[in-house]
Image (cartoon, rainbow, N blue to C red):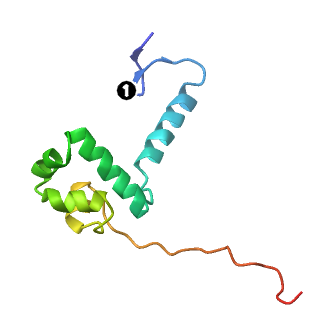
Amino acid sequence: MHGSCRCGRLCPWRYGVGHADAHRQADERLLISRLPRTLEVKDVVSLLRAKVQEAGGVSAWSKKTGIHRTIVSKVLHNSKPLTKSIIKALKLRIVFVVRNDQTKSTKAKGR
């Protein structure tokens, strides 16, 4: 039975055992979904491809965003790098991340 909980939420547990734990877990899931994720260029192009398909094609997405369709098409076919306008239209931003390369061999050289 779903009811209003004393915590002010619509709660299926309604004062049951584990009530606080259930809300804590739900809050953690919500927090994790809001954390920024690191995307590679290929991931951004995949996101662009999905948004274009969702809009009904390159022309439709281009009209919706105001970005020329030839630029979008060239980015999708990897003949042009991502543009700032496409990144902005996807509601993304550019950040720089320090790479932590731990691929170096720990073996001693010459042994």
Q: Residue at x 26, y 55 (%)?
A: 91
Residue 111: image location, x then y, percent: 89, 86
Above or below — where is 38 with respect to 22? below
User: How many numbered circles are shown?
Assistant: 1
Q: Residue at x 30, y 57 (%)?
A: 76
> Which element is circle 1 on?
loop
Residue nearest the observer in this picture, 51 or 93: 51
Q: Residue at x 34, y 50 (%)?
A: 47
Residue 23: image location, x then y, percent: 50, 31
Disc 1: CA contacts within 10 A as few (<14), some (14-19) or many (>=20)? few
Mark 1 is on which residue type?
Answer: Gly
In the displayed structure, does residue 45 sit left or right of residue 30?
left
Residue nearest the observer in this picture, 65 or 81: 81
Can you tell which quarter of the image residue 74 is in?
Answer: bottom left
In the picture of the structure, the residue carrying the numbered disc 1 is 8
* Quadrant that contains the N terminus: top left
Residue 18: image location, x then y, percent: 59, 25
Residue nearest the observer in this picture, 97 or 20: 97
Residue 73: image location, x then y, percent: 23, 57
Residue most extreme to the top: 1
Residue nearest the observer in this picture, 98 or 86: 86
Can you tell which quarter of the image residue 44 is in?
Answer: bottom left
Above or below — where is 53 with respect to 62? above
Above or below — where is 33 with respect to 14? below
